Amino acid sequence: MTSTRRTPRHRKKIDLALQGGGAHGAFTWGVLDRLLEDERLEISAVSGSSAGAMNAVVMASGLMAGGRRQAREALRSFWASVGASAQLNPLNGGLFGTLFASAAKWSPLGQYLDFATQVFSPYQLNPLNLNPLRRMLADVVDFDAVRRCDRIELFIGATQVRSGQLRVFRNAELSVDVVLASACLPMVFQAIEIDGEAYWDGGYMGNPTLLPLVHEATATDVLLVQVNPIECDKVPTRAPEIMARIDEITFNGSLIKEMRSIALLKRLLRDEGRPIERYREPMFQRVHDLRLHRLDGGAELARAGNGTRMAADPATLSRLHRLGSAAADAWLARNFAHIGRRSTLDLVREFSGESVSRRA
């Protein structure tokens, strides 16, 4: 793995969009670890939901405490505590077997718990609303520092239960409850109440949302770190595979809609051929200038399967971290020169509907 030791005069600014995906958030940890190591880059804003939100606030807290090195250490410490907690869990799937309600399905206890979550609500199964992530976040994240952080803009999504709308929380609004709301799966935890409103997992309506990065952030390069595959190689036929594919489609749905909207607007601007300066709406300028990139785990992360989303044992987390770090290293080698120059993800081709209609 290469490493950039010299601090360049001019860093390339980039925004990050971090998906949620259970323990696959450790893949994103590996990506962030590698990006923070490269001093040619400046991460200026992050949008995240669920595990992506956790990674975002942990990184921001570390940056405020001591810069890049401290941010990397904070991420390592957080995921180490997740792994340590998993070793105390009686389910083979570990901590995220409880948090994401599907681990160890084929053990008798796992089957019973899976059945129980379909019959009973968390208000019955977990009346005290215990959540081990509350302590882990409180131990690692200085939320006072995050709220006053001026080094990085954060956009954390959570789904408002009553309206079904996405609420995006910014730095000054962030707290441990906001992050737990962003990761609140409703069949596992009671809804998190903030300012009198109840919230569930942000991934339902924005996994993650790109719009704040388009409207408010200053960088024109956005890197999507994707842990949920959009396509699959074959039609699933077994019940666990079907449920896993339903989860992937559900938690990618909002992202695909946003990508399609941006792609259609880019296509409109391109096909109309008018000078961008003639548009009065600043958003058109932002969309016109937006350069989008994507980094994912490819076939190797896809082969890991849905089971590893719920497995938070230290060995699995370490493997996912290594996979993320290697993927980021390879992405930088291929694409660093393109940052600030052009998109490496062809939005119009992939999300405007053209490629789908051709395949059909």
Image: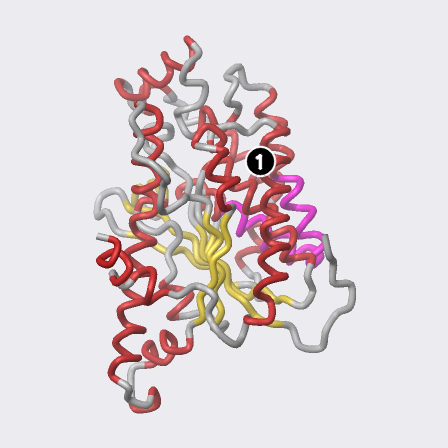
Magenta span of residues: 53-78
Closest to the observer: 138 or 266? 266
| Residue at 45%, 32% in the rendered image | 305
Q: The disc labelled 1 sits on which kind of residue? A: Met
- The percent coordinates of residue 183 (x first, y second) are 42, 40
Q: In this rendering, would 193 be left or right of 309?
A: left
| Residue at 50%, 22% in the rendered image | 93
Where is 63 relative to 162, above or below? Answer: below
Evaluate whether residue 206 shows in this view.
Answer: yes
- The percent coordinates of residue 286 (x first, y second) are 38, 76
Q: How is the image coloured?
A: secondary structure
Where is 350 relative to 135, above or below? Answer: below
- The percent coordinates of residue 292 (x first, y second) are 44, 66
Chief secondary structure of the magenta portion: helix
Residue wearing tag 1: 136
Closest to the observer: 240 or 98? 240
Where is 248 relative to 264, above or below? Answer: above
| Residue at 26%, 54% in the rendered image | 359
Q: Can residue 57 be found in the magenta stretch?
A: yes
* Total numbered badges shown on the rendered structure: 1
Where is 172 relative to 20, above or below? Answer: below
Outermost residue to the front: 359
